[in-house]
Amino acid sequence: MTNLGRKNDLQTKDSKYVYFRFADGILECYVKEIELLDLPAAKVCVQDRLEFIQNKSYPSLFDITKVKKSTKEARDFMADQGNELVTASAILVTSPVLRMMANFFISVNKPKNPSRMFTDKQAALEWLAQFKGSYCLALLATLWAQVAVIIAVC
């Protein structure tokens, strides 16, 4: 893994599976071309992200446009342990298959932080901006989403 350094509040790191870019309070994670994202690969991705962010929480963009398939174990891991120190997740997709995968991930795996799927990177970054610098806001957004579900059911 290569740390390319800090330049104008921009920090980057290239790992085996992910290219990380930190800018303006948002962590951008660009997953490289992966035929099958399995549990071992998912664990490496998360470990590399945690090393890069050095125990700080950030809203995060996850560009999974180059992932072909993922296993259930990898998705379960990403929804739980994989969300450690992520205040909010914007999942960027382009294809209908990835859109279905991301929707399934959000609705079935139920990540523990506010999570939304996007097809437009700029829209994703704008949504994430509301979570910059505030872990409390992220917790409130999660609680509000849970309250909204309870109200809808009642």
Image (cartoon, helix red, strand yellow):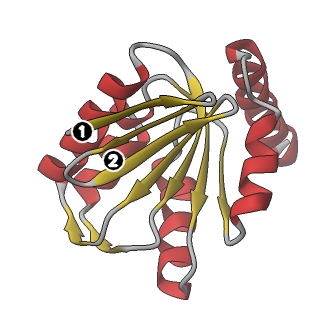
Q: Residue 33: name its quadrant.
A: bottom left
Q: Which residue is drawn at 30% across and 42% down?
A: 77
Q: Residue 120: name its quadrant.
A: bottom right
Amino acid type at circle 1 is Thr
Q: Nearer the viewer, residue 78 or 29?
A: 29
Q: Nearer the viewer, residue 101 or 20?
A: 20
Q: Which residue is drawn at 19% across and 39% down?
A: 1
In the shown orientation, is residue 130 left or right of residue 71? right
Disc sitting over residue 37 in the figure: none
Q: Where is residue 113 in the image (x, y as percent from the top left)?
A: 60, 33
Q: Nearer the viewer, residue 104 or 5?
A: 5
Q: Position of residue 21 (x, y in %)?
A: 49, 42
Disc sitting over residue 2 in the figure: 1
Local SS, label 2: helix
The residue identified by callout 2 is 76
Q: Where is residue 37 in the image (x, y as percent from the top left)?
A: 24, 62
Amino acid type at circle 2 is Asp
Local SS, label 1: strand
Q: Residue at x 19, y 41 (%)?
A: 44
Q: Which residue is drawn at 57% across and 79% down?
A: 94
Q: How far apart are marks 1 and 2 (CA)?
A: 28 Å
Image quarter (top left, top right, bottom left or bottom right) of the C terminus: top right
Q: Residue furthest front?
A: 7
